[in-house]
Amino acid sequence: MLDILPKTAEKFMLWPWSKIEPYFNDLALHPMEVASIAGWLADWSSLSQLVSETYHRLYVATTVDTTDHQAELRYQAFLDGIYPLAQAANQKLKEKFLASGLEPDGFAIPLRNMRAEAELFREANLPLLSEEKKLSTEYDRIKGNQTVDWQGRELTIMQLLPVYQDPDRVVREGAWRMAAARQLTDRQAINDLWHKLMYVRQQLSSNAGCANYREYRWREMLRFDYTSQDCVRFHQAIEAMVVPAAERIYEKRRKQLGIESLRPWDLNVDPLGRPSLRPFKDVGQLEETTARVFNHVDPQLGDYFEVMRREKLLDLDNRKGKAPGGYCIEFSAVRRPFIFMNAVGIHEDALTLLHEGGHAFHVFESAHLPYFQQLQIPMEFAEVASMGMELLASPYLAIPADGFYTEADAARARIEHLETIITFWPYMVVVDAFQHWVYENHAEADNPDLCDAKWAELWKRYMRGVDWNGLEQEMATGWHNKSHIHQDPFYYIEYGLAQLGAIQIWRNARHDQVGAVAAYRRALSLGGTVTLPELYQTAGARFAFDVETLAAAVKLAEETIEALEHGIQRV
């Protein structure tokens, strides 16, 4: 029966549930035997991939144009009429497979995941999960519509970012304050949305018999290899080893700028008064230069990126009505990645494309795995793929005549990148610790005013070195602007852990770039078939939370910054 399934998600997405359901039923009735298990898993994979790709394509349509009402209706119709029913049908297939006792080759980790998912599954949660995704779309709509009138032009908040690099402090302060004021006008709307999200998440955890939403989410995210206490240990290590390093960076910047105190609008301007880094003029040049960089890292990776260019799997420019942020998403049926971002011409855009390119390479490298269930990659390693690529590509930012920069500007860009890595870790702690507090104290956190207070408390503890005096309201509502808190709860510690893994890969590449890239690609090719620590080990790193590993990473970053500042380019 499965041989007459549509070959593409574009056709499949036109099907109502009444046409899809018989395929699930056929799989549920099929005998489960050793001789037929490979074919049965292949059929289940084909069906799952079509459902997944349909969901992702409909979601993408709502982000590339948040004003497209028809796209939103199609997405919501899928969430109401297909998604929960497919989830319930998949649950029956998981139970059937688990009951068979069969374990095909390469399926130990997928089976572990299925057992956890089957234990967590509650049919009563299906409409709640759909509602949560709708609320996520509402958050995108609110943020995507935030624009300001800057010097007679309507700009998105993202399009203001280059102004923050203006050497005129008055100009960049004006832009920063205008953006902050615009964001505050949506304060009530986001608070109202927060109440709805908190209710849904409370119900999800209650229905599943979990003590709180953190426990529910931990199990949902299949976090087998570390606990919430490990996160706290990582927070403590960052406070001990990284917060002082970040303060050193901020103090150096303050002195270079010659100002009494460092303010939020002083963080993006070049502290030595040099013109802002402008790595590209338009997204066409961004694509072309990035392609050359990837080709220097590894020719096969360069070929993968060319596939994405040919098949129009990139949406890179920023525009009004486009959802904020950036992501790489997989179209599972065709085993292709799609990259979405908001480029405005600054160095961070080049880094973002390198980052999302790492995610895309994960899709290509793991595409050989036969079953959909083997592609459930832990995000703690998925982010190693992306952050590792940022660092593996860093020696090639100044390819003669073909790169983003001159040698001098490339060194400057690398310094900024390494400093950003150090200053990011404390921010990551604020985001992660905030969410631990929220879901351990659900009743209190349902009050946005108390959320503001907790965010401010964490900010003052970890984000030392920048003066927010007189900006207490803007600081306290910073959680409104972090999409992960609203759309992907607890998905942020991954960035901190993965950054530590990525630096270890980069350390290896400093001595053997070819060998480090080969190890990186081997790890990506494993998909989700081995444990998280094994993925790190294959890539040449250690999955760690401890002070010692973090201290070594900070030391390497600071030493490299110093060498680059003294004109030693190839470090």
Image (cartoon, rainbow, N blue to C red):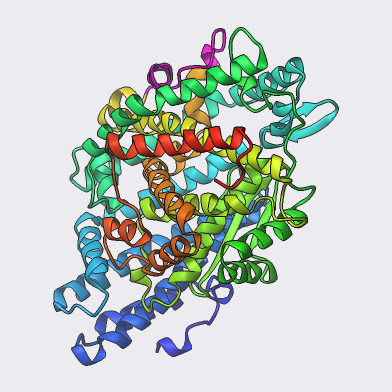
Main SS category, magenta section: helix
Of residues 74 and 34, the one nearer the viewer is 34
- In which quadrant will I find the C terminus? top right
> x and y percent of residue 317 in the render?
71, 49
Residue 452 within the segment the image draws in magenta: yes
- In which quadrant will I find the N terminus? bottom left
Residue at 72% across, 38% down: 277
Q: How many marks?
A: 0
Residue 457 within the segment the image draws in magenta: yes
Residue at 61% across, 26% down: 183
> x and y percent of residue 136 in the render?
49, 44
Q: Does any portion of residue 98 appear in the rendered image?
A: yes
Q: Does any portion of residue 199 appear in the rendered image?
A: no
Of residues 211 and 382, the one nearer the viewer is 382
Farthest residue to the right: give it.
152
Magenta stretch: give its range: 447-473
Horizontal side of residue 147 vs 427, given as left or right? right
Of residues 196 and 299, the one nearer the viewer is 299
The image quarter containing residue 11 is: bottom right
Horizontal side of residue 100 vs 412, given as left or right? left
Horizontal side of residue 411 vs 98, given as left or right? right
> x and y percent of residue 450 in the render?
38, 18
> x and y percent of residue 330 in the render?
50, 64
Q: Say above or below: 9 vs 524.
A: below
Residue at 46% across, 40% down: 484
Of residues 506 and 178, the one nearer the viewer is 506
The image quarter containing residue 314 is: bottom right
